[in-house]
Image (cartoon, rainbow, N blue to C red):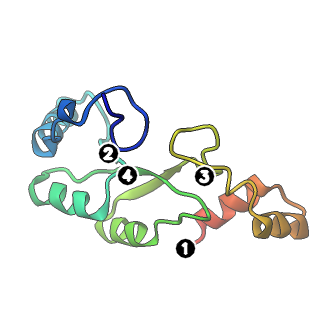
Amino acid sequence: MKPAAGYGVPFSQSDLLPMDFKSVWEAMEECHKLGLTKNIGVSNFSSKKLKQLLLTAKIPPAVNQVEMNPLWQQKKLRKFCEEKGIHVTAYSPLGAKGTLWGTDQVMECEILKEIAKSKGKTLAQVTNQLLNYK
């Protein structure tokens, strides 16, 4: 078996099936209508996927959780979500060292280190402020 998408995972491309976003979202809307959840959202949706979802969604996603950090700010996606009233929340704001897909570029960024030092803050505090800046 060849690793899928270059991540070294032990399954083949033929094992992958396309995601039926419409049916899955309808089921999540039903959970919401039944009171099983207060809000429903998505993770790792691009603007293109969100546009497709919004064509049929009766309840728009409350949130889109995506990887975001000072070196990958997702400006286009954040603007789209803001226009649609979808909250964006970040994961891996300090990078993703030790993962198959990430690096330690954020924590090793000399510019961020200089800003943190000049402000008497930690690099994590500076990163948080940068991500919350509009």
* Relative horizontal placement of residue 109, taking residue 35 as reference (left or right): right
Provide the secondary structure element on which disc 4 rests: strand
Q: Mark 2 points at which residue?
A: 41
Give the CA distance from mark 1 to mark 2: 22 Å
| Amino acid type at image mark 1 | Lys
Q: How crowded is mark 3: few (under 14 residues within 10 Å), some or many (20 or more)?
A: many
Q: Residue at x 44, y 52 (%)?
A: 66
- As drawn, the label of residue 64 is 4
Circle nearer the N terminus (3, 4): 4
Give the CA distance from mark 1 to mark 4: 17 Å
Q: Residue at x 37, y 51 (%)?
A: 63
| Amino acid type at image mark 2 | Gly
Query: Horizontal and vertical percent for residue 19?
Result: 17, 41
Q: Residues within 10 Å of mark 4 (few under 14, many from 20)?
A: many
Query: Horizontal and vertical percent for residue 3?
Result: 36, 34
Provide the secondary structure element on which disc 2 rests: loop
Give the CA distance from mark 2 to mark 4: 6 Å
Image quadrant of residue 48?
A: bottom left
Q: Name the residue under label 3.
A: 93
Q: Which of marks 3 and 4 is in front?
A: 3
Query: Horizontal and vertical percent for residue 105?
Result: 67, 56
Circle nearer the N terminus (1, 4): 4
| Amino acid type at image mark 3 | Pro
Give the CA distance from mark 3 to mark 4: 15 Å
Give the CA distance from mark 3 to mark 1: 16 Å
Circle nearer the N terminus (3, 1): 3
Circle nearer the N terminus (1, 2): 2
